[in-house]
Image (cartoon, grey):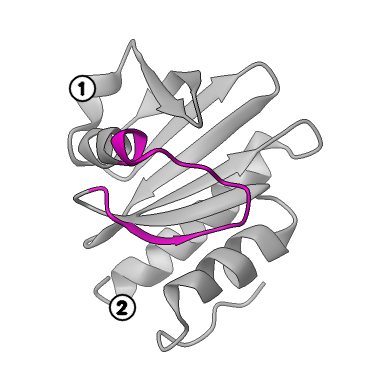
Amino acid sequence: AKLKSASMSWQGYVDQQLVASGHVSKGAIIGLDGSQWAISPGFNLDPSEAAAIAAAARNPSSVLGGGVNIMGVKYMVLRADDTAIYVRKGSDGACIVKTNQCVLIGLYGENIQAGNCNTVVEKLGDYLRENNY
């Protein structure tokens, strides 16, 4: 999927760039403070979880060897660095990507390969960073 102009709404990025790719089952964009900017239907991200994910994105080493909670499920952290955190539980997982102003969250499930989900979320993250988001 080609990335559209920066005038697209945050919800548009979630719906058209993440979920419509077919490689992200649910997506969200949150602020670095954990505030919810956009979220796909059925992604019931608790405000405390969003705040914790934003904190983890700002300080990735804080979650190494630990976990991240998403919709009441604790995911094991596989890798965490300054741009992305990769988490997994069984066949489900997520890619969490930090940009200058926000955090992208892409979930995947049984029928989606982790690598494909990661690529889609990372590509949107790169695009937003290039456009000073």
Q: Pointer 1: what residue?
A: 62
Q: Let me know if residue 47 is in the magenta part.
A: yes
User: What residue is pinned by disc 2?
Assistant: 131
The quarter of the picture where the C terminus appears is: bottom left
The one nearer the camera, 63 or 52, is 52
User: Residue 38: percent from the left, percent from the top?
Assistant: 44, 63
* Image quadrant occupied by the N terminus: bottom right
Say left or right for 90 vs 71.
Answer: right
> What element does badge 2 sit on?
loop
Visible residue check, residue 42: yes
Answer few, some or many: residues within 10 Å of disc 2's Cα (few below 14, many 20 plus, some between 14 and 19): few
Measure how far apart labels 2 and 1 are at the Cα level.
28 Å
Rendered residue at 72%/37% (across/down)? 113
**Extent of the magenta region:** 34-50
**Image vertical order of residue 91 relative to residue 15, above or below:** above
Q: Earlier in the sequence, mark 2 or mark 1?
A: 1
